[in-house]
Amino acid sequence: MNSQQRGRNVVVTMFLTMDGVMEAPENWHKTFHNAEAQAFKHQELFDAEALLLGRRTCEIFAGAWPHRSDEAGFADRMNSIPKYVVSSTLTTDIWTNTTVLSTNPFERIAELKTGAGGDLLVCGSRSLAHGLFQRGIVDELRFLMDPVILGNGERLLPVQGVQVDMELLESRELHTGSLLCRYSVSSNTHQEAA
């Protein structure tokens, strides 16, 4: 586990189906979202130092969060937290407190890890998560696995061509039947032979 190193942790967090689909959770997760899940996501966001996002996820979030508000302050935190977006096509900051990483993004993220502070949280952003896993930059994987099978859709795992060793940190069942799991990610990432 990389948490023994000083600096921030890169944490990949996802909503998943039982067959590993992470695409378009707005179409299936809301059935299973409850106060337990909300409390976990709230704590996760407020513990984070910054968000790491891919272009598509950032565009979706930037189109939604600035128009929301809530008593718990979740929307305000989403809008105010520093955001780093990996994109070769975005040329302007499209959301408050956003920095576009267009040149050497993974090296820049590795540099961000060396600073002091809270987690660097990767929300959604499947392609970005794959790139981080392939380079051994992920410290923790968190997911809420909902009791539903879709049969198709983009999956978080496996990261093709890479073996990622993990150790279970936490696993608990929510009242909806969803599973909350947290894994530390080994610094030993194995590239499979081509």
Image (cartoon, grey):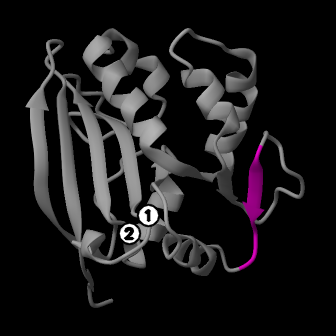
Q: Could you tell me which residue is drawn at 72 percent across and 61 percent down? A: 87
Can you tell which quarter of the image residue 189 is in?
A: bottom left
| Rendered view: 155 above or below 135 | above
Q: Position of residue 167 (x, y in %)?
A: 11, 62
| Rendered view: 133 above or below 141 | below
Q: Could you tell me which residue is drawn at 37 percent across and 66 percent down? A: 138
Give the amino acid type for the residue marked by disc 2 in the picture.
Phe
Q: Report whether residue 153 is seen.
A: no
Can you tell which quarter of the image residue 30 is in?
A: top left
| Rendered view: 42 above or below 168 | above
Q: Residues within 10 Å of mark 1 (few under 14, many from 20)?
A: some
Contact between labelled residues 2 and 1, with CB atoms less than 8 Å apart: yes
Disc number at residue 130? Answer: 1
Q: Could you tell me which residue is drawn at 42 percent across and 27 percent down? A: 42
Give the amino acid type for the residue marked by disc 1 in the picture.
His
**In-front residue for pair 56/109:** 109
Disc number at residue 133? Answer: 2
